[in-house]
């Protein structure tokens, strides 16, 4: 006889309030409606990708001779930073702080180019310049982003791109940034880097791929090196393995604990954490695993991190899309203070959160989401007069850009916080299921 099992809403289109007939009854913690996830097929690396791998691990390209791409984007740390500090150290003596927390290089294989406004169905519809796109969004109604929505938000905000401010559209462009940044690998110049490439142990691979003539064109040589690094990131499976416990749970190959299930419900609950409003937890319509980011940009008003060298200047502000690193959208002040929503995959193994690395634990991050508006004194400094310095890392004229509409940021001082301490503990338990490398049940 068939048993009827009532399944609570997991939100975002997954198991939402459905009634299923099961035979036999679903095991505790199992997904009662497994799905098939599409993963990229694993294949041997191409010659170009193998060249990119050599470059990715080559510390000789830095001025110190001690820092490679892999030094900040460690394979042992989900291609994120291996240190416990808010930023990494670079430069000629490895003493200069980077400007921002190092993002992970994982799960970028489906990233779209930087644009402003909702994703277009037709690529030809997205040919307007950024200024024109931004102008079209001025005065547009802002829609609340909630976890139960089944499509990406249509808000006219930046989306896509790479880095915290989206200034690179391709992995090739992204690879060249740290290579030349004086506070990171500090390669010096294209000419210096090209000379090192000509004398690298893998120089013969360049010749095999492009011919000896590539060594005579300095700019082309460095461009192809960056392209090879991007190719390595696309082809190497560990950059996008989708091997978390949650992936296997979606496929019916793993069971979540009671705490993990409670955390998932809270993650998808628009009246509680509402995490999935920005960190999408459902597979794509095509069946690709969830990326846990909508790739849109938000101004959340994270506290100023006084541990950074830059913040020693009281007039310095990192405004994300508006600069100071990115220059081309600086006049679109409605986006000042906005940074890209990162993927939450492997987030539980990080030690620096938000663009400035101000938070060091997931507990601190969740406290920020819980208390930012109801009890701001718990997350922001208080001045000598007892006034809370809320949004203290955004100039006053741009503080209106901070998100106060999307739950849980729609609460006010004195309101009941969206999450209890137990809620936060359960959400952290769920976030730990997003770490790669899980061995599924047979």
Image (cartoon, rainbow, N blue to C red):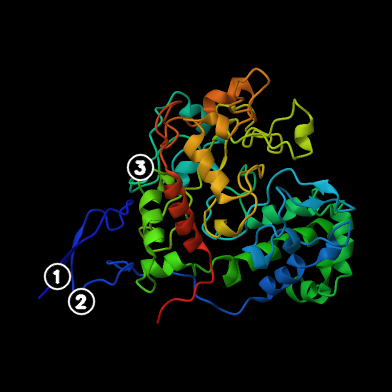
> What residue do we see at 56% from left, 56% from top?
347
Disc 2/disc 3 C-alpha distance (Å): 32 Å
**Of the numbered discs in the image, which one, if any, rests on residue 3?**
1
Of residues 338 and 205, which is closer to you in this image? 338
Residue 60 lies left or right of residue 79; in this view the side is right
Above or below, comparing residue 354 to residue 19 in the picture: above
Percent coordinates x, y for residue 327 in the rendering? 69, 34
- Circle 3 sits on which residue? 270
Q: Earlier in the sequence, mark 2 or mark 1?
A: 1
When asked about the image quadrant of residue 83, the answer is bottom right
Mark 2 touches mark 1? (CB < 8 Å): yes
Seen as rendered, the residue at the extreme bottom is: 442
Disc 2/disc 1 C-alpha distance (Å): 8 Å
Percent coordinates x, y for residue 142 in the rendering? 41, 30
Above or below, comparing residue 212 to residue 78 in the picture: below
> What residue do we see at 61% from left, 71% from top?
236
Q: SS class of the residue under badge 3?
A: loop
- Circle 2 sits on which residue? 24
**Of the numbered discs in the image, which one, if any, rests on residue 237?**
none
Q: SS class of the residue under badge 2?
A: loop
Q: Earlier in the sequence, mark 1 or mark 3?
A: 1
Q: SS class of the residue under badge 1?
A: strand
Total numbered labels: 3
Percent coordinates x, y for residue 95 in the rendering? 86, 49
Could one spot residue 159 in this view of the protein? no
């Amino acid at each position: 006889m068939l048993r009827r099992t009532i399944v609570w809403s997991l939100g975002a289109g997954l198991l939402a309030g459905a009634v299923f007939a099961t035979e036999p009854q679903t095991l505790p913690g199992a997904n009662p409606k497994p799905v098939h996830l599409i993963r990229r097929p694993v294949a041997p690396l191409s010659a170009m990708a193998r060249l990119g791998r050599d470059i990715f691990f080559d510390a000789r390209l830095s001025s110190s001779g001690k820092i490679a791409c892999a030094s900040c984007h460690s394979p042992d740390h989900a291609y994120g930073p291996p240190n416990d500090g808010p930023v990494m150290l670079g430069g000629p003596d490895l003493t200069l702080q980077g400007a921002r927390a190092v993002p992970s290089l994982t799960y970028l294989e489906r990233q779209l180019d930087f644009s402003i406004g909702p994703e277009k169905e037709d690529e030809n519809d997205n040919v307007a310049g950024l200024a024109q796109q931004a102008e079209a969004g001025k005065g547009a109604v802002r829609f609340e982003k909630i976890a139960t929505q089944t499509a990406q938000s249509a808000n006219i905000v930046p989306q896509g791109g790479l880095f915290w401010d989206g200034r690179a559209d391709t992995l090739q462009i992204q690879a060249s940034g740290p290579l030349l940044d004086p506070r990171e690998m500090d390669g010096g110049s294209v000419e210096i880097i090209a000379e090192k490439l000509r004398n690298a142990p893998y120089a013969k691979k360049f010749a095999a791929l492009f011919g000896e003539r590539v060594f005579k064109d300095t700019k082309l040589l460095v461009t192809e090196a960056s392209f090879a690094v991007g190719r390595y990131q696309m082809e190497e499976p560990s950059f996008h393995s989708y091997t978390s416990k949650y992936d296997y749970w979606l496929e019916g190959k793993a069971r979540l604990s009671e705490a993990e299930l409670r955390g998932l419900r809270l993650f998808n609950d628009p009246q509680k954490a509402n995490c999935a409003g920005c960190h999408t937890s459902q597979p794509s319509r095509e069946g690709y695993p969830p990326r846990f980011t909508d790739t849109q940009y938000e101004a959340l008003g994270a506290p100023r991190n006084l541990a950074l060298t830059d913040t020693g200047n009281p007039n310095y502000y990192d405004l994300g899309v508006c600069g100071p690193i990115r220059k081309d959208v600086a006049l679109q002040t409605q986006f000042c203070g906005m940074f890209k929503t990162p993927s939450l995959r492997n987030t539980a193994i990080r030690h620096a959160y938000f663009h400035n690395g101000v938070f060091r634990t997931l507990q601190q991050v969740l406290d920020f989401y819980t208390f930012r508006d109801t009890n701001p004194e718990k997350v922001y400094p208080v001045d000598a007069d007892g006034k809370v310095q809320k949004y203290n890392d955004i100039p006053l004229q741009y503080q209106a850009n901070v998100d106060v509409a999307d739950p849980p940021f729609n609460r006010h001082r004195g309101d009941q916080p969206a999450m209890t301490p137990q809620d936060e503990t359960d959400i952290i338990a769920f976030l730990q299921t997003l770490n790669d490398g899980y061995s599924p049940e047979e």
